[in-house]
Amino acid sequence: MIAVSPAAAVETVEKSMTIKATRQQVVNAIIKHRTADPEKRKVVSTKNDGSSVTIKERLDSPLPVARDNIVYEEHIDDNRVDFKLVDAEKLTTFQGSWVLTESKPGYTHVSLKTSVDSSLNIPFKDRIMRYETAKGIDKRLSFVKQQSEKL
């Protein structure tokens, strides 16, 4: 499933899948994703209870509008993980959430929604941002599915 916002300054992309794993296994896989590629992404700070972390990530793309170094905060609640931009060179918006719902015993429906916008003003920026965001969501969902199902 994919839903894209109507023509707006901020592009929102949402994708979802059902994973054969418990909600806690999925949360553990999301947490593991933070440090799975240390060349690209690292945790720079964690709150004492571990519910919020600040992450520095390099977004790679052959297209300059979608390439950036960002810092964002991620907060874990019972059935969701929310994230929001703290700092970036080009992006003005990077926020969203993972929503986790038990679909049946041992299965979790995972929805990842991300909204992005860039300060760069170039032709076809909206299409590029949608495409790159959808590609990034696919990679994250794939990683989480693979990690969750092997736990």
Image (tube, rainbow, N blue to C red):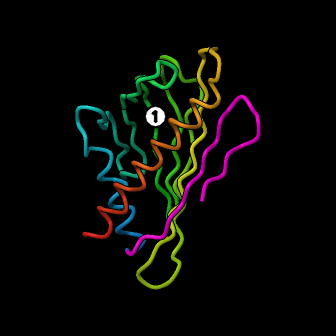
Q: Amino acid at mark 1?
A: Tyr
Position of residue 123 relative to residue 135, above or below, is above
Position of residue 107 relative to residue 74, above or below, is below
Judged from the image, the secondary structure of the residue bearing numbered disc 1 is strand
- Residue placed furthest toward the bottom: 105
Residue 134 lies, in percent from the top left, at: 52, 44
Nearest to the observer: residue 144 or residue 102: 144
Residue 133 lies, in percent from the top left, at: 52, 39
Residue wearing tag 1? 72
Q: Is 128 colored magenta in this rendering?
A: no
Residue 59 lies, in percent from the top left, at: 40, 30
Q: Quadrant of the N terminus?
A: bottom right
Mostly what secondary structure, the magenta segment?
A: strand
Which residue is pictured at 65% across the width and 36% down the height?
11
How many marks can you see? 1
Q: Quadrant of the C terminus?
A: bottom left
Which residue is pictured at 31% across the width and 33% down the height?
44
Q: Residues within 10 Å of mark 1 (few under 14, many from 20)?
A: some
Q: Looking at the rendering, which quadrant does residue 15 occupy?
A: bottom right
Q: Is 6 colored magenta in this rendering?
A: yes
Residue 7 lies, in percent from the top left, at: 76, 34
Which residue is pictured at 71% across the width and 43% down the height?
5
Position of residue 50 relative to residue 20, above or below, is above
Which residue is pictured at 46% across the width and 22% down the height?
63
Nearest to the observer: residue 45 or residue 124: 124
**Highlighted magenta segment, given as a residue range:** 1-20
**In this rendering, position of residue 47 left or right of residue 122:** left
